[in-house]
Amino acid sequence: MKKNNSAKRGPQDTNQHNTQPDKIGWIRKFCGKGIFREIWKNRFVILKGDQLYISEKEVSDASSLNS
């Protein structure tokens, strides 16, 4: 069966990249267990509509993210 690459999955909203993010903040991601303790890493996340952006560093201008 061939893959159809002509259409992208999910809803296509062209105005979504111009909107402000719904939520912005830091989360802690569990990365496993070390020898003496569990390993957690911080991640900066931005929620815009149904899109979730994850970064290791804080993004200063969240409105510039493109879908």
Image (tube, rainbow, N blue to C red):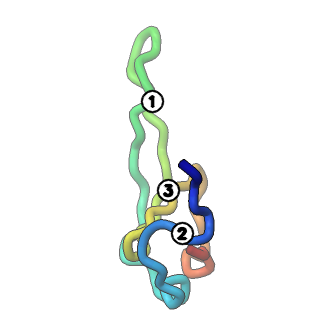
Name which of mark 3 and mark 1 comes first in the sequence. 1
* Disc 1 residue crowd, few under 14, some 14–19, many 20+, Cα 10 Å: few
Residue occupying image coordinates x 49% and y 56%: 44
Q: Are marks 2 and 1 in contact (CB under 8 Å)?
A: no
Residue occupying image coordinates x 59% and y 66%: 59
Q: Name the front one of labels 3 and 2.
A: 2
* Disc 2 residue crowd, few under 14, some 14–19, many 20+, Cα 10 Å: few
Q: Amino acid at mark 3?
A: Phe
Q: Amino acid at mark 2?
A: Lys
Badge 3 element: strand
Badge 2 element: loop
- Residue under circle 3? 44
Residue 53 place in picture, x, y as percent: 50, 62
Picture layout, residue 32 above or below residue 65: above
Residue 23 place in picture, x, y as percent: 37, 71
Name which of mark 3 and mark 2 comes first in the sequence. 2
Q: CA distance from mark 3 to mark 2?
A: 26 Å
Q: Which mark is residue 31?
A: 1
Residue occupying image coordinates x 41% and y 18%: 33
Q: CA distance from mark 3 to mark 1?
A: 15 Å
Picture layout, residue 11 above or below residue 51: below
Q: Amino acid at mark 1?
A: Cys
Residue occupying image coordinates x 56% and y 81%: 63
Residue 42 place in picture, x, y as percent: 48, 44
